[in-house]
């Protein structure tokens, strides 16, 4: 597999990272049409791809990489959750591959996400105008790290919007509720959901022989987790259940391939956000006064810190009301 990784002609959207024998992470290059990570798993005569990036071009490169690495067409694609940076490339893989997700993810993709894509396609010109305005604002940003992140975000947004006329919203055709297993001649992949934490329904791919988990956005490596659609307490519970598996290597939804240490970092971050907001509410302080703790200031997705505070604030005040 290493020789095949080295002989792959490459993609501007991702870098291939050999994780284990026949397990490869496609790590997103910031500011391109990938945005999120994906994975390619050769089960032996059966190829499983996990997540499909934010744009069709990135997904086409991912399909080409999978075929190059395994010498076989892609058999299955699993979406870890419904967000577009993990699902927009689905159409590239059908009809050759079966698309798989949890029942909850399917429902979200077939209703809310479908309607949202239609709205995007109907408002494409306005979205391009907004991106142009954001690019001007980015040029005025004085914080170099934040300016770089905003530039990456704007570049990816532009690629996504430019792709919209060609996008056919493609939903999974196979669903599961708790767990399903895909068997190849060399290894098996366990597709598992413990419910919803990052979204209403999140799934992982666990490769017990390799002690690898492809975890979607339940773990982001050195990135602020995104709580906009989250249930933070359920998220913590899910991470504890994943910790009980025999895992050494994690392919995260964003950031570099990592280990259980980054899973524990995400647990610490979510708990810290809950504590910060709870104390602010109890002391009648505005969450606008809260700043990023030192240990998270080097993390990417900086702008999500404020939206994460707002999400937890809304959950806490709603429960008290």
Image (cartoon, rainbow, N blue to C red):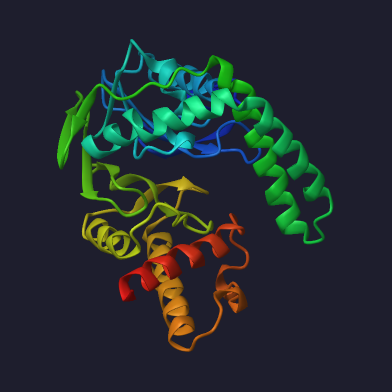
Residue 178 appears in view: yes
Percent position of residue 195, x then y: 23, 50
Residue that sits furthest to the front in the current view: 321
Residue at the image point whose x is 77% and y is 61% from the top: 143
Q: Residue at x 33, y 10 (%)?
A: 95
Q: Is residue 58 above or below residue 212?
A: above
| Image side of residue 208 versus residue 296, left or right | left
Q: Quadrant of the N terminus?
A: top left
Quadrant in the picture for residue 278: bottom left
Q: How many marks?
A: 0
Taking depth in this image into account, of 229 and 250 the one nearest to the observer is 229
Q: Is residue 210 shown to the viewer in this render?
A: no
For this orientation, the residue located farthest to the top is 95
Residue 25: percent from the left, percent from the top?
45, 37
Q: Position of residue 154 (x, y in %)?
A: 69, 40
Q: Quadrant of the C terminus?
A: bottom left
Q: Is residue 153 left or right of residue 261?
A: right
Of 75 and 318, nearer the camera is: 318
Snapshot quadrant of residue 73: top left
Instruction: Tell me where residue 15 sits by quadrant.
Output: top right
Residue drawn at (40%, 28%) of the image: 114
- Identify the residue at image location x=45%, y=17%: 168
- Relative placement, left or right, of 31 versus 245 is right
């Amino acid at each position: 597999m290493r020789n095949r990784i080295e002989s792959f002609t490459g993609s501007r959207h991702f870098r291939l990272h050999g994780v284990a024998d026949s397990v490869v992470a496609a790590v997103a290059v910031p500011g391109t049409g990938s945005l999120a990570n994906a994975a390619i798993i050769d089960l032996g005569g059966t190829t499983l791809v996990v997540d499909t990036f934010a744009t069709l071009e990135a997904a086409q490169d991912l399909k080409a990489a999978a075929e190059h690495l395994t010498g076989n067409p892609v058999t299955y694609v699993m979406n870890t959750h419904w967000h577009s940076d993990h699902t927009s490339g689905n159409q590239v893989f059908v009809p050759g591959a079966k698309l798989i997700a949890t029942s909850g993810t399917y429902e979200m993709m077939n209703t809310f996400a479908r309607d949202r894509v239609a709205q995007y396609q109907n408002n494409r010109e306005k979205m391009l105008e907004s991106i142009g305005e954001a690019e001007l604002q980015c040029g005025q940003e004085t914080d170099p790290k934040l300016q770089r992140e905003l530039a990456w975000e704007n570049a990816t947004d532009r690629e996504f919007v430019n792709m919209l006329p060609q996008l056919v919203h493609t939903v999974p055709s196979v669903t599961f509720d708790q767990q399903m297993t895909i068997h190849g001649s060399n290894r098996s992949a366990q597709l598992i959901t413990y419910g919803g934490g990052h979204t209403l329904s999140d799934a992982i791919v666990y490769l017990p022989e390799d002690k690898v988990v492809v975890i979607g956005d339940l773990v982001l490596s050195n990135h602020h987790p995104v709580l906009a659609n989250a249930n933070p307490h359920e998220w913590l519970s899910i991470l504890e259940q994943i910790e009980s598996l025999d895992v050494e290597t994690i392919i995260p939804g964003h950031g570099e391939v990592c280990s259980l240490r980054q899973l524990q970092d995400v647990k610490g971050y979510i708990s810290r956000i809950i504590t910060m907001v709870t104390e602010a509410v109890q002391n009648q302080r505005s969450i606008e006064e809260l700043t990023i703790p030192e240990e998270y200031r080097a993390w990417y997705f900086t702008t999500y810190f404020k939206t994460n505070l707002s999400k937890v604030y809304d959950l806490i005040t709603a429960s008290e009301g």
